[in-house]
Amino acid sequence: MFLSWSIIVAAVALLAVQLSAGERTSCVLWSSAGDVVRRGTSFVVYCTFNPTCKTSRSISRFDSSTSFEKQTHDQHNETTISLRVENITEKTTYSCSANCNPSLDDCGVDISAGYPPDRPRNISCIYRILKNDTGRVNCSWDRGRDTYLWNRYVLWVSTGSGNHIGGPVPMCNVSNKGTESPSANFTLHRSARLMAVWVQAQNSLGSVNSSVVNYTLSDIVMPSTPVVDRVECSSRNCAIKVEQPLRTQHLQIQYRAERQRDWTTYPDSAGLLTSSNTKHISSLEPCSLYSFRARSRFSTGLWSQWSPTIANRTEEEAPAHALDVWLATDLQSIRVYWKESIKSVCSGSISQYTIKVNNRVVTRVGPDIKNHSVPPCADCEVTVQAVNSKGSSPPATITTHHTKAKPVLDVQASAVNHSVTISWIKPETACAYYVVEWYSQGHMLDELRWVRLGGNETFIIISDIKSWQCYEGAVYVFYNKSSVSKTSFQRIATLEAAPETGPLVQEKVEGNKVTVEWKDLPRAQRRGCITRFTIYLENSKGEQKSYFAQASKRAFEIEGLPPDLYSLCMSASTSKGEGPAGQKIKFYIEEDDQLSPVLMGLFVTLMLLFTLCLWKSSAVKNRFREIFRCLMPDVVPDPANSKWAKECTKEKGKMHLQLPSHNSSFSDPEEETILVDVEELCRHISDSSAPGDSLLRVSSKPTVDQETELAFVLYPPITTYIKSFSHDSDSSDQTQESEETNVDYISSHEQENLQNCDQEDEEEFPEMHFFPSLSIFMEPAGFGGKLTLDAVKIDCSDFFQNA
């Protein structure tokens, strides 16, 4: 009862004060535990309204996780409502509102929750010398748990006999969210020898003092932080200049190379009492980036803080180590590989590599090239050197000839996760070293990797292996410089699956045999190591057969196939299964007709016989000559077409020659047949004759009338003459030779007349045929013996018979 009246009186008094101050609020809000409470406590919030605000009274709550929410309140009395708050854990805002006449503002209050401060502990003080006579003390401590409130710390200091100097050292308020350790600083003269400190912590919920901590200042004295002024480096040494405001007895320098985590401490430098100190650090690697830092200490006390780091790079020098060299050989060339076994030169400082064969320079290649092909040789030494601006590395030599030794037994290769382990049994004979090489299957010259191991090693773990790829390689054992053994390992993959597709095939059909050829699958589609290929063959009836080929094969023959239409496809397999088949192709196996060559030979024989039979026919020969006349040489005119021959048409086969009347020894030309020898001669036309004329010479043993003319049509430049003789008789008396030979010249007719004559002769004498002396066979026609004019008709059969 007394508490209720007390609350009412306090509320009325507070409201009266607000109204008298002119504030336009509708109510007064307060907490039974105050504005700051301990976390986890419970209390009651009261709200007393102005008498003019009688309707819609409410209390709302807001914290960091919710917006303003109306709460279910209790009616304490006619003008006051209340809200019970349970287990508060964070700062919360409460607000009260109502309908007032006239309208008034709402009222509210912020209630903070936290803890009283813990006792400060672990007080630590450092005495930093600023000048020769003064120093600055810095003390820090652990404040304990977070109070979630604003805290205030006061540092108390006393020296000598316990007198307080300088009074309390005030601290800035530390946020209730702060996590850093609080600290305080104050100045102290160097004449002081002892010091006692303690800390007082307080907030809205309480106050507490730490225990007193005593210090001997010489134990906590610390020099100022030194400054690394500059660093100058050669190839293996660096000089570090350090600046210090005061003389110290100890200077410590640390350094580390690029990408190293741990620092290397250079030994302490005792007795360096100057303010400017220079330290020399040796045994560094050439062309490497180093970072440096320094700190100092008096003869007693603490080390100073580390100086900011400063970096510099050492200079390069000629490569100090020989390259690691290895050889790979194929059918056409030898390829030498090299790499730097130990980093001793700047990155990118190599200007070139020199390759020698038997101490003769073969070539020089750029710094980015790490392998090169050399001319093949049976027994030679290959030397490789790295060259930079300072000189060349020691020569690294490898020979192409090695004596084969007993191979290493039981080389095991196993893949685990993303690495491959290669192991072997150490040979009985002591060896110098091992070389393990590996490469992606089928790409030795392009992707060769190797590592050189000591003679006591028996395994190696290879990590630079690509997933889903097949690898192979070998282990070499070197017993000395030239004696070596080799044991290969194959088909190693870290991850495998069935191939993604089948190979593309090509077929070649020969009789009842088909040869299937294919190429390697792309590496991305193999999905590991191929173990075998499967060939699927199907005929037109749907019957299917399977054939298996080794993984190393690229061709396969299928024999004994009956005639049919076939379809064929292939698939590839790994240890994890068979992949899908590739593109399907079709081909025919035709029937093997053995009679075709026989029939063809018989047909050709019959055609030859038929052609020979036709050639026996004169009409066929003439037609052949007419068709291919353009291919024949110039034709000798046919005597049967001459005027002289036409006159004998009255009496076919006879020719009357008019003999001189004074020669009575000749018989009557009507009673006696004149026999004529025909001789074909070729000579040039005399200068007196007209160009292009054809001449005919006729000679006879009896005297012949000189005015008798024989008009033969001749083609220049061939001149034909006919020598006429008397009829041969059994006695020499019947033969009389003319005292002189008479020659008559007859000029040839125009071309048109010749053609007309030819046509007339063919019509008048269809049975008479004269062959030219130059036929297409280039053989003269021989008639044998005496030839009468009625026998001038030449038959084709006679010609071929003579031929």
Image: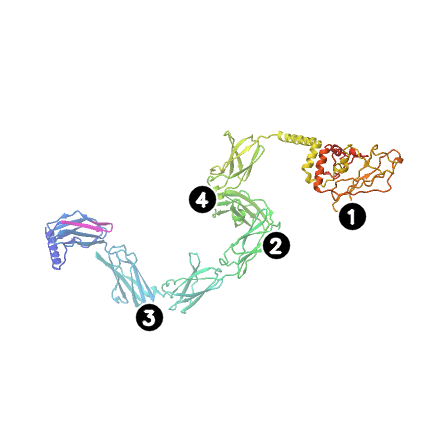
Q: Which residue is mark 2?
A: 358
Mark toward the start of the polypeptide (3 vs 1): 3
Is residue 126 or residue 343 the one in the foreground?
Answer: 343
Residue 622 lies left or right of residue 151; in this view the side is: right
- Say if 779 sits above or below 33 in the image: above
Residue type beneath disc 3:
Asp
Circle 4 packing at 10 Å, graded few (<14), some (14-19), many (20+), is: few
- Give the label on residue 417, or none: 4
Pointer 1 with pointer 2, Cβ within 8 A: no
Residue 249 is situated, as x and y percent measured from the top left of the image, at: 40, 67
Vertical order, 20 against 714 (above or below): below
Of labels 2 and 3, earlier in sequence is: 3
Given contact means CB atoms under 8 Å apart, are the residues at marks 4 and 3 in contact? Answer: no
Say if mark 3 contacts mark 1, CB within 8 Å: no
Q: Which residues are magenta?
A: 56-68
Residue placed under numbered mark 1 in the picture: 688
Do the residues bearing badges 1 and 4 touch, measured as CB atoms within 8 Å?
no
Q: Can residue 615 be seen from the camera position used here? A: no
In the rendered structure, which disc, 1 or 4, sits on the residue that comes first in sequence? 4
**Residue 760 located left or right of residue 412:** right
Which of these two is toward me, 729 or 154?
A: 729
